[in-house]
Image: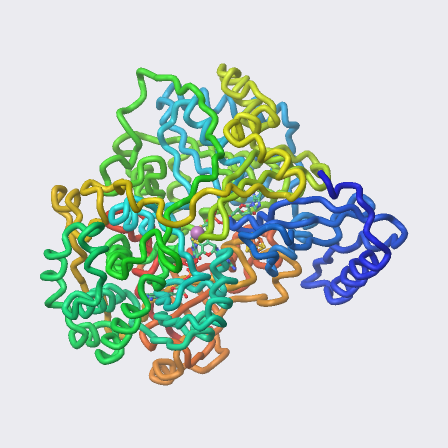
Amino acid sequence: MKTEGKTLSRRGFLQASAAVAATAAGVPALKGYVSTAHAAAASPQAPITSHYTVCDMCFNRCGMIARVQNGRVVKLDPNPKFLKSRGMVCARGNAAVEHLYDPNRLKTPLLRKGARGEGKWQQLTWEQALDHAAEQFTRIAEKYTRCGVMFSPGSDMQSQFLIRFAEVFGSYNVTSHETLCLLSKNRAYLDTFGETPYADVLYSKYIIISGANPLEAIITPDTIDLIEARKNGCKIVVLDPRYTKTAALADEWYAIRPGTDMAFFLALTNVITEERLYDPDFAEKMLFGLEEYSAHVRQYTPEWAAGECGIPAEDIRRIAREIAAAAPAAMIYPGRRSSDYEDSTQIRRSMAIANALLSNWDRPGGILAAREVGVRAPYFDVPWYDDNPEDRIDHGMAPGLIHHEGSFKLMRDAIIKEEPYPIRGWFTFKTNFMQTAANRNKTLEMLKHLDFVVNADIVMSDTAWYSDLVLPSPSFLERNDPVSALQGSSACACAVWRDAVVPAMYECRDMLSICTELSRRLGFPESFNFTLDEYRKSQLESIPEAFEAIKADGVYYNPSKVYGIYFDSPLKTQAKKIELFNQRYAHEGLDPMPVYKAPRRKEGAFRLVVGRTAFFTHSNTNNALLIEFMDENTLWMHPRPAAGLGLKDGEMVEVASGVGKVQLALRLFEGMEEETVYMATGFGALSPQLPLVYNTGASIAEVLEDHADFISGNMAMHETLVTVTRRVG
Ligand SMILES: Nc1nc2c(c(=O)[nH]1)N[C@H]1C(S)=C(S)[C@@H](COP(=O)(O)OP(=O)(O)OC[C@H]3O[C@@H](n4cnc5c(=O)[nH]c(N)nc54)[C@H](O)[C@@H]3O)O[C@H]1N2
Ligand SMILES: Nc1nc2c(c(=O)[nH]1)N[C@H]1C(S)=C(S)[C@@H](COP(=O)(O)OP(=O)(O)OC[C@H]3O[C@@H](n4cnc5c(=O)[nH]c(N)nc54)[C@H](O)[C@@H]3O)O[C@H]1N2
Ligand code: SF4
Ligand SMILES: [Mo]
């Protein structure tokens, strides 16, 4: 690496150490927990070396330069050559130093001794741990077939190794966090455009953001580009039942009634089709089913929609005319997490169809398909096992399952029922479903049907706490990772890898090493018969120039075509065009065009919605630096319904749903739609080894009911109606 070993200039060094000292001074010991992150500043004489890396505090993978002194990481700066993140590192990225030096890191393999959740562990050597895991996998495979083990790889550059392992081992039952995240949106765009979408935010002139909050739920480069686009005169309209940071940036915010977005978009497209505000040439060439769709949305007038979603008809009509005038450099932001409603695929399809009518597909300021990066997925042989069942355990349980992901929600139900066949083992890596899958009690119930759960994490997450074998992983700053292709708007089609910034601490081992060792024990060593360097070479076979670029700049950009990729080639849909009318849906008895169904309501109940804060990623809350921004979660509610219930700001309330109840403090906030309540994720942990969030605040996973999107099987997390009462006692 070009920068490695390079000593900073005296001026740069003084700046770096001043910043370090300032941060260290600002970090008091919290709840008996001493932050160790910045202790390395102790020896000011030692040189600082710089190393490219890629942040892993969330899936965005922003480019970083790690500053190392005395063998310890003392600071993380943005990589200015990294276009995707526009030379930015967010608060969480900065706090990765604490993630690395967290005193609660797992240090050795641990085998459960007492009952699950009792916290009695025996330290094992890696030899013992791997032997034990191999024995358990063999036992389960012999008795229940190889599909008797479920695999859950998290969002990680090494997850491809666990997937390869699962496939060669012979299990079809792989499912990930994606089935709690973006599957409905992906399904909707695949079934409309034949591609998953990227948003060309920077060049857009008009953006409607609905069901997303990119100023807190950071997506690079979209978050940064929104601010830039706004400065360049782009109009931003936000629909969200909460007044979010994105709402604060917007020109207009509507506190939409939760679950009614489709009404808004059907009415928006009613205006666009009735008034013929679309581009007829684009429509002729690219759209399939425009006539049927125009007839279909005639019933969905703005006046009708206003009664459903609470947004005045004249605003819907005006917004439709304005956005159509700004098209094609205009968009309905596709968003990301769409694990919200049972009808989410159809809700997102109503948004995708609105995009189609703006003729923004494959054009500047519009919706883009993935660009060519050139990173190859190395080939491997997948053996056939005669005794395996026909298919995944959740096969056929939802008409639009994405086959390689399935649905965790449906798999968990099937495991509990033990139908169509039993699953007895679970290998989870870098996921914490105990906190991130709705209905924690059901996850606990599922565990009763599993006799071997192995979890690889860097800390004792709630999921690790309930596992049988816990494997300590190196953090992203301590390991070498394969090449990863990144996408994001028109900004980049890039490739990156990671080299360890500091050596792996304790006895941590990465997923490649675990899969290599297990494959030897299980009799398929040839599947992991490569070094990481060889693997990278095979990934970059078609773009060898990427090697030097990554070494020199920390990133390689493929100068592939950005716009107009599809102007002269057919789309990957059945009609080869953008399907407003989906033929496959019609064939399978699904609504070929989105049909509005009003969300359930119950007198006296609130709808509980999920949403992020800018300073935490999901359940990764036990970070001494980040917890300073928010050390407990609260229940957000509008003051009017609170007054009706006689509840006051700050008092303790009980939130109860059909599956659980929790207690936490009430926070009154006028920026809430009145039927909606909200609480942040990642609190009320069950693992005492997450001391900052153990028994602190409340776990939303405890109260969220586990519904599923009818089409994709994605978890539907906004279908929970809760009652809120004063805590007694
Ligand atoms: N209530 C609620 N539920 C949600 C969401 C929500 O906002 N609220 N969001 C949904 C969405 S969009 C998603 S994508 C999913 C995410 O679901 P998960 O993937 O389960 O999310 P995380 O909480 O990020 O869990 C990551 C785990 O990996 C561990 N980890 C971190 N770094 C490393 C590492 O380098 N190696 C290893 N081995 N482990 C590591 C962390 O300690 C943590 O336990 O959650 C979904 N569920
Ligand atoms: N800081 C931070 N950034 C992250 C993450 C993180 O955990 N922390 N996670 C990353 C991941 S994995 C993902 S998937 C993305 C998620 O990115 P987003 O999908 O943008 O994230 P959410 O915070 O879930 O935003 C959903 C918003 O929808 C609103 N909402 C709820 N119900 C309705 C409704 O019925 N209609 C409308 N119109 N709005 C509704 C919620 O109030 C919330 O503000 O963020 C990514 N970036
Ligand atoms: S958005 Fe923040 S946490 Fe996520 S990868 Fe980028 S710097 Fe890291
Ligand atoms: Mo996500």
Q: Is residue 412 above or below residue 327?
A: above
Q: Is residue 610 above or below residue 559?
A: below
* Horizontal arrangement in the rendering, residue 381 relative to residue 133 (left or right): left
Which residue is at 65% across, 54% downward? 78
The percent position of residue 86, horizontal first and vertical second, equals 57, 57
The percent position of residue 544, horizontal first and vertical second, equals 57, 30
User: Closer to the camera, 20 or 653?
Assistant: 20
* Horizontal arrangement in the rendering, residue 321 relative to residue 247 (left or right): left
* Horizontal arrangement in the rendering, residue 76 relative to residue 203 (left or right): right
The percent position of residue 356, horizontal first and vertical second, equals 26, 56
On the question of residue 441 being in view, the answer is no
On the question of residue 340 being in view, the answer is yes
Which residue is at 43% across, 62% downward? 203
Q: Is residue 231 above or below residue 457?
A: below
The percent position of residue 362, horizontal first and vertical second, equals 34, 51
**The N terminus lies in quadrant:** top right
Which residue is at 39% across, 23% downward? 170
User: Closer to the camera, 158 or 493?
Assistant: 493
